Amino acid sequence: MVNKKEKVKKSHLKIKVHKKKESSKKKGKLKQDGEVYLHTGIPGFDILFDKHYGIPSGASVLIEGGPGSGKTIFCLATADGLCKQGKKCLYMSFEEPEERLMGHMRHFKWDVDGYIKKGLLRVKRFDALDVSRSVEALLSAAKKELLIEIDPVLFPEDFTPDFVVIDSLSSIASAFSGHESRFRIYMEQLFRYLENNKITNFLIREVATPSHIGATYKEEGEAVSFLSDGIVVLYNVIYENGGRACALEVLKMRGASFEKKIVEFKIINNKGIEVNPNKVISKDRQKGFVLT
């Protein structure tokens, strides 16, 4: 173990276990089996789940898709919906700066400034290279011991979130380029931390062509998909006639029943996003299309 006296920069990982949140912070829709579920507030999305319960509280959910498929907007919309319910949300960006993300929310008329003022929302940018360097430092200090305990997500000490977005795993993975074993260690610790602290979270991952529709994709660390509790896939739909659209599919969600279908997903200018659970993307509706 690392000597407690060893100084670690504030921006780096810490060997520290945060106290679990009080159960009162985890209010949501209560199912008969005692499980708590969270409504995202995104029109049409929660309807895809059994009895409209939504996402199981404390779940780690991959938000997966290609460039321009709407991953960031989907996660920001979820933060907006949860802030409206009085839940505290943390958006951790390893790519876009804070002001640009807040600008996206203002564009859709979401009350980002009000949420921040009320202490419901925190948007913060991090450096993925800091994560990589810190993991290496901790492994070196522990003499390459693989069972190290770390606080892997750099939470602000003055903010205890109910919901976290990590944007994106792809950026973090690139910082571990050539060191897949370290990335795997980091991801295992990350999922363990989120689970132990009962934090519902969305982890954005960019995948150019979804592997589950027949493409070949080598995952960094080969661990993320099976460690996650759920996978929500956002698609770019390209029709043979030149038309384009967006679609959404709940591919996996432990602890919840959901509809297995690919449905229309819209980003509406100056308004927000919505899912049409009754409009299935199929070749019967418009011949010839590709999902990316």
Image: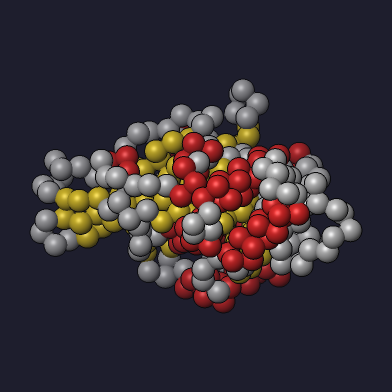
Q: Is residue 124 depicted above or below 49 in this figure?
A: below
* 99 relative position to 21: left or right: left
* 282 relative position to 171: left or right: left
Q: Nearer the viewer, residue 119 or 158?
A: 158
Q: Nearer the viewer, residue 175 or 27?
A: 175
Look at 54% across and 38% down and name the residue there: 227
Residue 177 horizontal/vertical position (percent): 49, 59
Q: Residue furthest right?
A: 5
* 151 relative position to 291: left or right: right
Q: Is residue 190 depicted above or below 115 in this figure?
A: above
Displayed quadrant of residue 26? top right
Displayed quadrant of residue 147? top right
Look at 33% across and 55% down and name the residue there: 208
Q: Nearer the viewer, residue 258 or 217?
A: 217
Residue 170 horizontal/vertical position (percent): 47, 58
Look at 75% across and 49% down and name the residue there: 142
